[in-house]
Amino acid sequence: MAFFSKYCTHWVIYPSPTETPDLFIGWLIDHLKHNTYDALFPIDEKTLDPVTQHLKELCKYTAVPVVDHSTYMKARDKGQTIRIALENDIPCPKTYFVSDVEEVRALAERIDFPVVIKPRQSQGSRGIVYVQSRSKLYPEYCRIHERYPFPLIQEFIPPGGEALGVEALLNKDSEPRAAFVHRRLREYPVSGGPSTLRESVHAPDLIEMGLRLLKALNWYGVAMVEFKVDPRDNTPKLMEINPKFWGSIQLSIVSGIDFPYLLYCVATEGDVTPIFDYQVGVRCRWLLGDFLHFLSNPNRFRLQPSFFQFWGDNLHDDILSRDDPGPVLGMFVSYLAQAFGRKLWRDLWR
């Protein structure tokens, strides 16, 4: 999508960091050697994994405002994240750590149901399974374990509580330089997935918890700490750390905190004036995802706010923009490319 933005002055296509990580890193180092850039922002796990592993080499050529690989993996691994949170008095769902699959048989006899099986590393909503009975825990765990080794088993937080995200920027000394909170209004899949509509909210106590966790990790750069309020005791409980830019970042920007620009300033100037004030009550939606939510939600015509509310002073969109309409075209090109496969497009290009 960024290729089509009016703000993009140059683009390159790099080797796949997942299929050929060595080729990707070799290409990236060579590219940085022969070109001048103020900073490098790896955006997703596919690029963050190899970039954090080769951080020292990359920092010879440009500023890379991310943590080292060991710290990054602590944040990616839900198991390590939960342990660090508990050490810092941050509420978490009751979590069971499994080191031998056979332990699950005994565990099933002494825990309460329902429970949730979660991969240790986020895969969107993939690999998450809700288990309602003792007899199903072991076979379901084995099935998930085959693809995502030693997933966590957690108590199920019942519906009714808000899902909240603390978005933050810390400088190289792990000092907070910006923080923002949003609550999810809708998501897709409906059972749990990326947010499709969210709203900026005021939650200083939640910010304090999120920053406490990130400081315990000696964090540098951006991250989002996700919480879900347990309706049984009204306590926000830690779900995970998203150790990168988050998909709903447009909301914080239109609310008054431009995290990408602030990160650029931290990377190139060393620090930035802290900013913690922002406009609350601002909403931002991912229209395509919200459309999918609408189609799959049996209460689609009773949504609050209504799906059919498309404009308002405090309503924005992640991608749609009158000033920069190009990314919408890029979005459709991207989806078509995925739908028909890269080989077909290469053949058509030839």
Image (cartoon, rainbow, N blue to C red):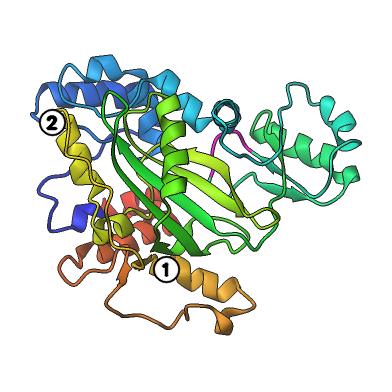
Instruction: For residue 39, say whether it is visible.
Output: no
Q: Give how far across and how far down residue 290 sits, in percent.
A: 46, 69
Most extreme residue toward the front is 205
Q: Give how far across and how far down residue 27 sits, in percent.
A: 24, 25
Q: Residues within 10 Å of mark 2 (few under 14, many from 20)?
A: some
- 236 relative position to 19: left or right: right
Earlier in the chain: of badge 2 and badge 1, it is 2
- 289 relative position to 150: left or right: left
Q: Give how far across and how far down residue 242 sits, in percent.
A: 45, 40
Part of the protein shown in magenta:
119-123
Q: Give how far across and how far down residue 254 sits, in percent.
A: 25, 61
Above or below, 267 relative to 91? above
Label the magenta part by its dominant secondary structure: loop
Q: CA distance from mark 2 to mark 1?
A: 35 Å
Q: Is residue 295 magenta?
A: no
SS for callout 2: helix
Residue plotted at (16% across, 25% down): 62
Toward which corner of the image does residue 97 lie, by quadrant?
top right
Say which amino acid is labelled 1. Leu
For the N terminus, the quadrant is: bottom left
What is the number of the mark on residue 268?
2
In this view, the residue in front, 51 or 304, is: 304
Instruction: For residue 294, say whether it is visible.
Output: yes
- 156 relative position to 163: left or right: right
Say which amino acid is labelled 2. Thr
Above or below, 304 relative to 329? below
Residue plotted at (31% across, 80% down): 311
What is the number of the mark on residue 288?
1
Residue plotted at (83% across, 25% down): 103
- 322 relative position to 283: left or right: left
What is the number of the mark on residue 299?
none
Above or below, 143 relative to 49? below
